[in-house]
Amino acid sequence: MNFAAPSSPATRLTDAAARVAGRLGDQVTGVEALDDDELLGLLSDAADTRKALELIVARASAEVSRRSSRELGYQGLAQRKGLRTGRALVQQITGLGRADVVRAVDTGAELAAVPSSGTKDAATPTTPPPAVWLQRLRDALTVGVLSQAQFHAIRTGLGDPPVERYPDFDRDFLPQAWARAVTLLLEEAATQPVEELRNQARVARDRLDPVGVTLRFEERFAARSFHIWTDEHGQRHGHILFDDDAGTWVDSMLQAALRPRRGPRFVGEDAADRARAAESDERTNVQLQYDTLVAVLRTGANVDPQQAFGDRQPGVRIIVESSAITAAEGRGVMAVTGVGHFEDGGAAVPAGVVEARLCDSGAIPVVWSPEGRPLDVGRELRLFTRKQRIAIAARDGGCMWPSCTAPISQCEFHHLDHWWEHHGRTDVDDGIPLCRNCHLRLHNQGWRIRRTRDPLTDADSYWLHPPPDPHTGEVGEPTRLASRSPRRFEAA
């Protein structure tokens, strides 16, 4: 991904601000008088203005921090203004929160090409040029493709290539893999919330650094804790730090309990009783989650799961490629040499956890074609089979609608060609996971999803086609749907 030569932040700021002023004009009523297209254009121009302004604030904040470094003592800029650190001075001037100031200073430091302390000196050699992957990320921020929050999400999620951790690799291998991951994340940044972008950057890092998966897993496991206290009003509080395995299990349990707003009611086996209880239930989702956890704690291992969760039992599915499983020499069993990924969210799982789950729960094999396509089963069945759903989940990773972050556990499976209207096939190739909201939107508003196949690579692409505009009849350009599966990142 190449970017045009960047203009200065000041030029970008004045250009974007001029567009905002031009859209608003001298209107007294402000944005309320704009039509839909004008309103969205104004918001886009305002976002460009903010990105340029954030870039200036970041660079200025980093420079204030540099001029206030500890090595300068009382001669530092912040110290001369009566403050201990440059970040404190930035916070005082800008009114930003501490986390925002830290992000601004860190982002500005990433972009700075001057020494880290002291004053500027033309004779002082600059730092060596950054790696291709990092320069690509910095360029995206500089030209306005990324906001500061998006840049920080990718930068912190990916981290740096741990070249020293893999001495047998060519030293260029991981940086090149990082560059490919950055390119893919930049393409997805326009349609993903910042939180999901950060999550996917971590997924990419874990695919490229399998050894680090275990190290990071053990760090979070060591940090697990539960604190409980009583406030001045007598209200009991709790604070939990989950390890990865337990946290994912709790997520799965709550997803099952809230589907659809079911919750643990323990009203007996009668379905009509359960339906009446659900209709009359006035609890919020957070209250249902609380009641679920307390009910499970109270009833323990002897609870009848059918009473609590209905026909969808909580469980955690882990996706692991067969290339990561080998026969353990001398033990007569299979050993996991790579990492797995939780089906919901794609977070990486160390080999030890995968082995434990294989021992406890077994495995369901999914066979892939050389082009990375799960095999079909044809039209014999109206609904996708359980194994087909597993294959689609492994391929797509969650709801495929742009900007939706619903996990696969909340998804239904949509036929690209409607079963009755278009005589659609129940094939894995022609199935797409969509959460219930997106699935209903697609059918109710007339959206369509089409599959195309590249004749050179035989790879499939899925495109979301909007319905005709109800006022003009025009049809907008289709949007390519991006998989959220960890498999889209190249494994180390």
Image: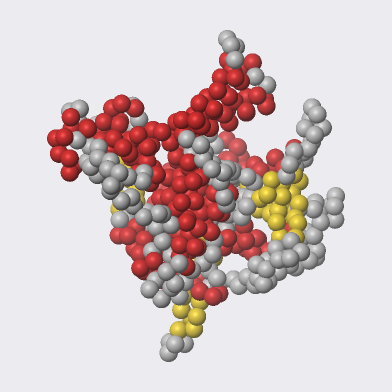
Q: How is the image coloured?
A: secondary structure
Residue 43 vs 197, above or below: the answer is above
Q: Which of the 4 quarters of the picture holds residue 474?
A: top right
Instruction: Give the left or right position of residue 7, taking residue 32 as reference.
Output: left
Q: Which of the 4 quarters of the picture holds residue 485?
A: bottom right
Q: Which of the 4 quarters of the picture holds residue 387?
A: bottom right
Instruction: Give the left or right position of residue 445, taking residue 400 as reference.
Output: right
Farthest front residue in view:
123
Identify which residue, 406 or 359, lies in the foreground: 406
Identify which residue, 302 or 14, lies in the foreground: 14
Residue 436 vs 300, above or below: the answer is above
Residue 453 vs 153, above or below: the answer is below
Residue 438 vs 322, above or below: the answer is above
Q: Residue 418: x percent and y percent?
A: 80, 51
Q: Residue 47: x percent and y percent?
A: 53, 31
Q: Residue 132: x percent and y percent?
A: 47, 56
Identify which residue, 341 or 173, lies in the foreground: 173
Q: Residue at x 42, y 45 (%)?
A: 152
Q: Residue at x 68, y 64 (%)?
A: 388
Farthest top residue in view:
28
Number of labelled discs? 0
Kindly tell me whether residue 124 is visible in this rendering.
Answer: yes
Q: Residue at x 30, y 30 (%)?
A: 91
Q: Residue at x 46, y 34 (%)?
A: 9
Q: Residue 377: x percent and y percent?
A: 75, 68
Identify which residue, 418 or 276, lies in the foreground: 418
Farthest bottom residue in view:
330
Kindly tell me whether residue 285 is visible in this rendering.
Answer: no
